[in-house]
C-alpha cells in the first residue's frame, strides 16, 4: 500500500483529502505544520507529499528543499504543493524548490489522485530565458543620446534635485538604427515608460550595455516596461562579475524575497551575453571597452557611430590620485608612480578625440580627501582627463547623493574656469535628466 503525507494547518482541507486518499487505497499520515511534517517524513516511508505552501513553523518551499536534499531516503517521491494564492512567482519558486505539481485551492481530491497516479515529470524546473529573436523588431531612427538617470549610489528625489534629477544611472542612445541603453539604474523606468508610449504596438529591439552590476546600475531593470512586452527583443551585454554571471545577478534582485515578478516571467525575448572581447559591434556601431578603476569588474564603453562618438565611464577613480595621495596606504615609489601614470594615460588614449564624454565626477577635491579608494573621481581630475584626451564635450556624471542642484552648478562653474585657465575649447556641462544631446557629423575642414 502506498503512503501519503498530508501537511496542512487547515484541519478541514486535510480531513477531506485524507478521506479521499484512504478510499482510493492510500495509507495517510497527517501533520498540522511544516516542521511536524518533516519529522514524520523522516520517520516513515512515504511515496507522496501533499503540502500547503504557507504554514507556521516551516513553509512549503522549505519542506520541498529538505526532502529533495535526501534523494536516497525518498526515491521516487512525488510532491504536490497546494496554496490559496495563484501568484505565478510562487509557482515558479515551488517548482524550483522541488515540487512536481502546484495546485491552487480549492483542490479537488480527484485532481490530486490523478496527479499521484501520473508519471513524475522529467523536469519541473522552468525553461530558461529564450534568446531566440522575434521577427520585425522596430528600430528607432535618429542619432542622439538622452539622459534618464544621472545620480550615483542611491536615488535622491526631492526639491533640491529637481533640475539635475535624482534617478540613478541610465543613458539612452539612438544611433545608426540601434537603440542602446547604458546601465539600468532607476532612470530606466522613465525611459521604459517613454518607449512604451512612443512605440505602442510596435516591436522593439534594444541592447542594454552594463558597465557593472552594482545596485545603482541595475536597480531599475525590474521596472523597465519594454521587458514586459512579448514582441520585444532585448539583448543584455556586460562583463562577467566576480562571483555570479550576468543573468544570475539580475535574477537575484527579482527573487520573490525582493520582488513579485521573476526574471523568467518577463514576456519579452531576453538574451544575455557575457562579453569576452573588448572590441565588438552592435549592428554598425563599434563598441570598445576598457577596465576602469572601481571595485569589482567594471568597464567603460566608447561607442563610435557614423555621426560621432560617445564615451561612457560612470564609475572611475584616477589611478595616480588614488595610489599616490599622501593619505593613501601602500607604496609610493617611482615604480608605483610610473605604473599609475601609465594606466591614466591608457584611459586618455582610449578617450582620444571623443565627441561626447560622460565621466564620473562625484566629488570635489576637498571631499575626495575622505573618499580615497571609493572608486569615484573628483571633477578636477575629470576635467584634466578630458582636456588631455582632447574631448569635445564633457558631461560631469554620477552626482553625489549629498549634492543638490546648486552644488552641482557650482562644480560646473569651476570646471569651466579650469578649462579656461588651460585655454581649452572643451564644453563642460553637468548631466541632467531629460537632456537630449544630438550626435552630429563632424564639420568638414
Image: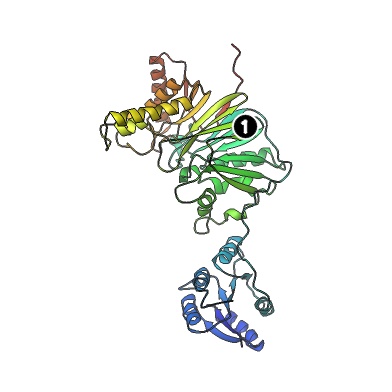
Asked if one can make out residue 364 in the rendered structure from this viewpoint, the answer is: no
- Residue under numbered circle 1: 174
Q: Is residue 153 left or right of residue 95?
A: left
Q: Secondary structure at mark 1?
A: strand
The residue sitting at the right extreme is 136
Asked if one can make out residue 161 in the rendered structure from this viewpoint, the answer is: yes
Report how many numbered discs are placed on residues in the image: 1
Q: Residue at x 51, y 84 (%)?
A: 44
Q: Nearer the viewer, residue 61 or 225?
A: 61
**Horizontal and vertical percent position of residue 344:** 40, 28
Instruction: Specify few, some or many for label 1: CA neighbours under 10 Å numbering under 14, 14-19, or 20 or more.
Output: many
The residue sitting at the top extreme is 445
**Horizontal and vertical percent position of residue 111:** 68, 76
Q: Is residue 177 left or right of residue 357?
A: right
Which image quarter is the C terminus in? top right
**Horizontal and vertical percent position of residue 237:** 56, 42
Determine which quarter of the picture holds residue 282.
top right
Amino acid at each position: 500500500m502506498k503512503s501519503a503525507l498530508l501537511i496542512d494547518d487547515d484541519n478541514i482541507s486535510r480531513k477531506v483529502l485524507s478521506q479521499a486518499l484512504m478510499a482510493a487505497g492510500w495509507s495517510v499520515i497527517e501533520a498540522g505544520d511544516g516542521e511536524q511534517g518533516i519529522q514524520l517524513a523522516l520517520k516513515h516511508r512515504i511515496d507522496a507529499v501533499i503540502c500547503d505552501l504557507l504554514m507556521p513553523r516551516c513553509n512549503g518551499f522549505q519542506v520541498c528543499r529538505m526532502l529533495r536534499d535526501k534523494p536516497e531516503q525518498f526515491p521516487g517521491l512525488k510532491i504536490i504543493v497546494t496554496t490559496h494564492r495563484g501568484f505565478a512567482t510562487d509557482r515558479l519558486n515551488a517548482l524550483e524548490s522541488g515540487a512536481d505539481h502546484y495546485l491552487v485551492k480549492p483542490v479537488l481530491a480527484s485532481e490530486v489522485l490523478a496527479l499521484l497516479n501520473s508519471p513524475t515529470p522529467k523536469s519541473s524546473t522552468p525553461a530558461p530565458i529564450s534568446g531566440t529573436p522575434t521577427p520585425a523588431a522596430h528600430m528607432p531612427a535618429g542619432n542622439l543620446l538622452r539622459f534618464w538617470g544621472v545620480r550615483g549610489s542611491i536615488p535622491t528625489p526631492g526639491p533640491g534635485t529637481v533640475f539635475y534629477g535624482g534617478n540613478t544611472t541610465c543613458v539612452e542612445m539612438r544611433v545608426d538604427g540601434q537603440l542602446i541603453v547604458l546601465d539600468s539604474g532607476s532612470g530606466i523606468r522613465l525611459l521604459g515608460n517613454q518607449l512604451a508610449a512612443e512605440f505602442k504596438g510596435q516591436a522593439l529591439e534594444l541592447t542594454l550595455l552594463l558597465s557593472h552590476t552594482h545596485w545603482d546600475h541595475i536597480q531599475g531593470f525590474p521596472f523597465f516596461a519594454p521587458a514586459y512586452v512579448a514582441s520585444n527583443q532585448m539583448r543584455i551585454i556586460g562583463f562577467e562579475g566576480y562571483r555570479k554571471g550576468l543573468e544570475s545577478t539580475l535574477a537575484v534582485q527579482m527573487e520573490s524575497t525582493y520582488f513579485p515578478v521573476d526574471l523568467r516571467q518577463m514576456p519579452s525575448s531576453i538574451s544575455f551575453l557575457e562579453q569576452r572581447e573588448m572590441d565588438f559591434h552592435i549592428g554598425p556601431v563599434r563598441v570598445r571597452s576598457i577596465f576602469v578603476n572601481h571595485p569589482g569588474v567594471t568597464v567603460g564603453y566608447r561607442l563610435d557611430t557614423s555621426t560621432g562618438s560617445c564615451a561612457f565611464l560612470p564609475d572611475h577613480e584616477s589611478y595616480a590620485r588614488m595610489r599616490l595621495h599622501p593619505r593613501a596606504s601602500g607604496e609610493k615609489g617611482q615604480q608605483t608612480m610610473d605604473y599609475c601614470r601609465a594606466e591614466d594615460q591608457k584611459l586618455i588614449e582610449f578617450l582620444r578625440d571623443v565627441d561626447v564624454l560622460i565621466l564620473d565626477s562625484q566629488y570635489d577635491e576637498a571631499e575626495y580627501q575622505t573618499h580615497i579608494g571609493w572608486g569615484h573621481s573628483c571633477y578636477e581630475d575629470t576635467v584634466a582627463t578630458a582636456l588631455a584626451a582632447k574631448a569635445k564635450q564633457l558631461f560631469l556624471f554620477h552626482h553625489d547623493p549629498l549634492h543638490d542642484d546648486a552644488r552641482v552648478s557650482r562644480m560646473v562653474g569651476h570646471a569651466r574656469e579650469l578649462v579656461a585657465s588651460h585655454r581649452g575649447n572643451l564644453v563642460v556641462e553637468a548631466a541632467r535628466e531629460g537632456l537630449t544631446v544630438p550626435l552630429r557629423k563632424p564639420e568638414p575642414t
